[in-house]
Image (cartoon, rainbow, N blue to C red):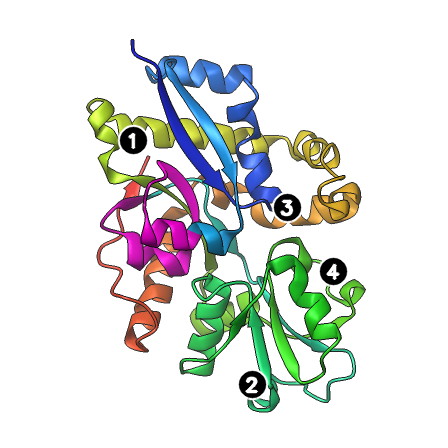
Amino acid sequence: MTPVQLTLAHSPDGDDVVMWHALASGDATVAAKAESLGLSHVSFRLIPEDVQALNRRAIERGDLDITAISAHAYPHVRVRYQVTRSGASFGEGYGPKVVVAQGSPCTALGDALGRARRIIVPGVHTTAFLTLQILAGRAIDAVEAPFLEIAGQVAGDPESIGLLIHEAQVDVEALGVREITDLGAAWRARTGLPLPLGLNVVRRDLDRHGPGFTDRVARLLGASVARAVGDHGRAALVLASRSAERPEWADPLLVGRYLAMYVNGRTMDMGGDGLEALGRLLGEGEALGLCPAPGEIDLAG
C-alpha cells in the first residue's frame, strides 16, 4: 500500500503536546489501532504553532490535513474542515481568565472594559476573545499578543486588561496580575453548558485516500488522545522532559492541574452537550455579527 503522510498541526501548550505524543512516538497501543483500522501505511508530521497562527492558516490557506483551531474559527473554515469527535478542549465551569494589573482599581468585567486603554488578546479568532465579546454583548477592539507575553504586558500597564489562555490561566497571581472574570465560569452561569475552547479538525477531502478514510483517521486520533487521558502521569513526564522549552512544565503540580482540566473524558468525546455548547457559542457569536453562521456541525470519528 502506498505510504501516506498527513500533516498534524497543534498548539504548543501542554494538552495538545500530550494528546499526540502516542501517535508520534510509535506507541504500541496506537500502532495496533492503526493496524485494525487499515491505517498502518499512514504517518503523521507534527507541526507545533501558536493557535492564532493556526487559525489564520486554516482560514487563509487550509493546506493542513489535520489542525487545531479555536472554536471561534470553525465557521470560517467549515466548508473545508470537519470537527473530530475527540481532541477538543472544554472548560467545565472554568476557562480563560480576564486579568488586570495588581494595582488596577477594577473589580468587575464591565468596569474593566469601560476603563481599559488596551485590551490584549491571544488572537482575534480565539474562543476566549469571542466569549468575552458575547459576555459584553458587543464587538470589542483589541490588540493581539503572543499568549505567553500577555500577563507581563498587563502587569506593567494598569490601564490594560488581558485574556490568559493555556497554562497561564492556572496560576494567575504568580504572574503578577489579578483575575476579574473566569470566562468558563461566566459561560456556565449563563448557559449551564461547558465552554468549547479548542477544536481538532480534519480536511473534508481526506477520503481521496479511500472510502471512509476521514472517519478512520479521526478514530486513530482518538486512540492517541485516549492514551493521554488514561495515563496523566506518563503525560506529565512527557512535558517535564521538555521543560527547557517551557519552564512551567517543570512544575509537576501545575502540569497535573492543567492536564486534569483539559485532557479528560470530554477530550476523548465531546458528547451531546459539548456539541450543543459549540452550537450555542457560535450561534450567539453569529447573532452579534462576530462570526459567520456555523451551519450544522457534523463530527468525524
Nearer to us in this view, 256 or 62: 62
Question: In the image, 38: left or right of 123?
Answer: left
User: Which residue is identified by label 4?
Assistant: 171
How many marks on residues?
A: 4
Q: Which residue is label 1 attached to?
A: 215
Q: Earlier in the sequence, mark 1 or mark 4?
A: 4
- Determine the CA span between mark 3 and mark 4: 14 Å
Gap in angstroms between the C-alphas marked 2 and 3: 31 Å
In the rendered image, the vertical position of residue 146 relative to residue 81, given as above or below? below
Q: Residues within 10 Å of mark 1 (few under 14, many from 20)?
A: many
Q: Nearer the viewer, mark 3 or mark 4?
A: 4
Please name the residue that numbered disc 2 is placed on.
113
Marks 2/1: CA distance? Answer: 43 Å
Per the model, the C-alpha gap separating discs 2 and 4 is 22 Å
Secondary structure category for the residue under label 1: helix
Residue that carries the numbered disc 3 in the rendered image: 260
**Amino acid at the residue labelled 3:** Ala
* Dot 3: element: helix
At which x and y percent is residue 208? Answer: 20, 27
Q: Earlier in the sequence, mark 2 or mark 4?
A: 2
Q: Residues within 10 Å of mark 4 (few under 14, many from 20)?
A: few
Name which of mark 2 and mark 1 comes first in the sequence. Answer: 2
Mark 3 or 1: in front is 1
The magenta stretch spans residue 77: yes
- Magenta region, residue range: 55-82
Place of residue 171 in the rendered image (x, y in percent of width and height, measured from the top left): 74, 60
Query: Which dot, 2 or 3, sits closer to the camera?
Result: 2
Q: CA distance from mark 1 to mark 4?
A: 38 Å
- In the rendering, at what x and y percent does residue 189 appear? 50, 72
Report the quarter where the N terminus lies. top left
Q: Nearer the viewer, mark 2 or mark 1?
A: 2
Task: Between label 2 and label 4, give the one nearer the viewer.
Answer: 2
